[in-house]
Image (cartoon, helix red, strand yellow):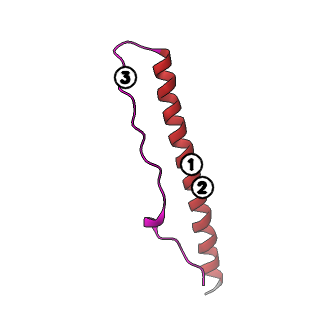
């Protein structure tokens, strides 16, 4: 019988520490913020993709084994 993963076993990446914005616009600081957010969302997308594939395949296996 297939094992359906529990939601508490999903590994979610840590929320990034966002830098404090400067009073005036600084292109380098904006680039740093964009990079931090890009890395976080890449990690989040990877976790979601892996876990949704596991859950979907396990759900099908459970349905077939009934």
Does residue 10 sit above or below 64 in this rendering?
A: above
Q: Is residue 20 left or right of residue 14?
A: left
Q: Nearer the viewer, mark 3 or mark 2?
A: 3
Badge 2 crowding class, 10 Å Cα cut-off, few under 14, some 14 to 19, many 20 or more, is few
Disc 2 secondary structure class = helix
Mark 1 or mark 3: name the one nearer the start of the chain: 3
Checking the image for residue 49, the label placed there is 2
Q: Disc 1 designates what residue? A: 45
Inter-mark Cα distance, 1 to 3: 26 Å
Chief secondary structure of the magenta span? loop
Disc 1 secondary structure class = helix
Residue 9 colored in magenta in the image: yes
Q: Could you say which is closer to the camera, residue 63 or residue 40?
A: 40
Checking the image for residue 8, the label placed there is none
At x 58%, y 61%, the residue is 52
Q: Disc 3 designates what residue? A: 21
Tell me the quadrant of the picture where the N terminus can be found. bottom right
Disc 3 secondary structure class = loop
Mark 3 or mark 2: name the one nearer the start of the chain: 3
Tell me whether the residue at label 2 lies in contact with that at label 1, contact meaning CB atoms closer than 8 angstroms. yes
């Amino acid at each position: 019988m297939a094992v359906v993963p529990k939601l508490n076993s999903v590994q979610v990446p840590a929320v990034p520490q966002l830098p404090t914005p400067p009073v005036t616009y600084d292109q380098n600081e904006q680039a740093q913020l964009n990079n931090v957010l890009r890395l976080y969302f890449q990690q989040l997308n990877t976790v979601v993709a892996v876990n949704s594939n596991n859950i979907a395949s396990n759900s099908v296996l459970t349905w077939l084994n009934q």
